[in-house]
Amino acid sequence: MFHFDNSYARLPDRFYASVYPEPVEGPKLIMFNEALAKELGVEADLSDPDRLAATFSGNVVPQGAMPLAMAYAGHQFGSFVPQLGDGRAILLGEVVDRGGIRRDIQLKGAGPTPFSRRGDGRAALGPVLREYIVSEAMAALGIPATRALAAVTTGEQVYRETVEQGAVFVRVAASHVRVGTFQFFAARGDTDGIRELADYVIDRHYPELKAAENPYAALLQAVAFRQAELIARWLGVGFVHGVMNTDNMTISGETIDFGPCAFLDEYHQMKVFSSIDHGGRYAYRNQPGIGQWNIARLAECLLPVIDADQDRAVDASNEVLREFGERFQAEWIKVFRAKIGLSSEADDDGELVQQLLSAMQDQEADFTLVFRGLADAAEGLDERFLSQFADPSKAAEWLGLWRERLAQEPQGDAGRADAMRAVNPAIIPRNHRIQEAISAANYGDFSFFTRLLAALEKPYEERAGFADYMTPPTPEERVTRTFCGT
Ligand code: AMP
Ligand code: MG
C-alpha cells in the first residue's frame, strides 16, 4: 500500500524509540483523502473501508513500516521541558511523493509510547476532526501545512474533561523535525547529535545549502526565513496558531499542530482563543515576535556547530535574528499589499494598511469579509465592505485614501478585483462551523464535517451551494475558547 523508505529510522537509536501502535477495539473509517493519497503514490482499495480503517488505526501495520516515536524537547509557554517526544504519535514511515518530496506518514492517537509521560497516547474525535479540517483548509488556502490523509474512530472511549470517542488522525508532513528536536540534543550536550540532525534536515529540506560556506549558519537562516514567510501568511488569513511552543514549530516551514488554533472572525490584534493562553503569549499580533523567539532557541542549539569560536557563532546567529525581523516585515507588507490590491510599492503602504486594521479593530469588523468586500469596492461596489463596520464613516474615509493610492498604480485598474479575490478568501474554517461539525460528529452525524470540508476546498470562490459558510457567527454561535487536543 505504501512504498516506504524510512530515512529517520536509519538515524542513531537515541533519536527515537521503536514502538508499535496499540490495537483498538473497533476501528471505523471517517474520511480518507483520495487526492492526497494519489499525490503520495499510496495504493488504497477504496472498496474495502474496513481494511483502510484497520491500517489507519494502527491495528494492521503495513508492510515496510518501521514504527517509531521521535524524541524531542521544547519550550512550552516559555518554560523548557527537556523531554517531550511523540507521546501519542507514531511515525509509520516515509514515502517519496509524485513530486519527489519525502513525506512522513504518522498516526496520531495510536497508543502510548515511551514518551507518553502521564498521557494515554490517544486522541479524541473532536480534536482529530479539527486538525483534519484546518490542515486541509490551510492547504487549499495555499499555506504550507501538514496534511490529513485519513481519520478513523477507534470504537473506544477516551477520558478528557468528559468522556469522548477515541479517534486516530493520519498526518502527512514534509517531516516532523521541530525546533524542539534540536533542543533535545542541545539539552544533553550532544553536539554530535545536533550535527547529525542538522545534516539530516539539510539533506531532506535544504539540499542547496550543502554548498554553502557555512551550511549550519545557512540552515538557521533558511529556517528563519521560512518561518517569517509562514507567519506573514498566517496573519494574512487571520490565523491564530494558539500554541507556538518550540516543539510545535517545524524545521521544514510547515504549519503543524492544530490544537487550540482558530481563525479570526472580527478583527482584534490581541485576539487569543486558547483556553490555556492566559497571558496572551500567542495572541494574533504576537506571532512574529514568538516566531523570532523560537528561532533564537534554535540558534542556541546550533551555536556549537556554526563555529568553534563562540563569539563568531553568536554574531552569526544575532545577524539571522535581525534578518528574521526584516524578512517578516517584507513578507507582511507583501501579503497585505496584495490583499488591498496594490501591485506597486509606495513608502506609506504599511501605514495605509494599519489605518484599515485600526478601523476594523475599533468597529469589530469581520477580518475575512472586509478584505473580500474590498475586492467589490475595487469594482465600485462599496456596500459589502462598508457594511462590515458598525460605524462606516472611518471606513468610508479610508476608501478615499485607498483610491488616491490606487490612482498612483502604474498598471491601472484592469484585473485588480480578480487579483484581490485570488488572495482574499471568501471561506475560512470559522470556529462555529468547526464546532458544529464536531458536535454533530459526536452524535454520529458526519455530514456537517463532510460539507465543511467541501466548502473549504475552494476558499477563494463564492460558490452558490456554500454561501452560508461565508457568514460570521451570530452572537449565540460565537466560539470564544478553543482547547488543546490533549
Ligand atoms: P501538543 O500539545 O499536542 O503539542 O503535545 C505536547 C506534548 O504532550 C507532546 O510530547 C505530546 O506527545 C504529549 N501528549 C499530548 N497528548 C498526549 C496524550 N494523550 N498521551 C500522551 N502524550 C500526549
Ligand atoms: Mg505538539
Image (cartoon, rainbow, N blue to C red):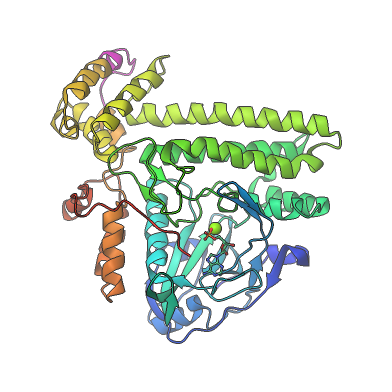
Quadrant observed for ligand 1 in the rendered image: bottom right
> Which residue occupies 21% across, 18% down?
397
Magenta: main secondary structure: loop
Residue 292 in which image quadrant: top right
Please tell me whether residue 127 is drawn above or below residue 113 in the rendered image.
above
Q: Which residues are magenta?
A: 404-415
Question: In this orientation, does residue 210 appear?
Answer: no
> Which residue occupies 40% across, 62% down?
132
Q: Position of residue 277 (x, y in %)?
A: 46, 49
* Foreground pick, 397 / 424: 397
Please tell me whether residue 481 is drawn above or below residue 379 in the rendered image.
below
Residue 442 in which image quadrant: bottom left
Q: Position of residue 467 (x, y in %)?
A: 18, 50
Would residue 406 be counted in the magenta stretch?
Answer: yes
> Which residue occupies 66% across, 58% down?
72
Question: In this orientation, does residue 282 appear?
Answer: yes
* Foreground pick, 400 / 5: 400
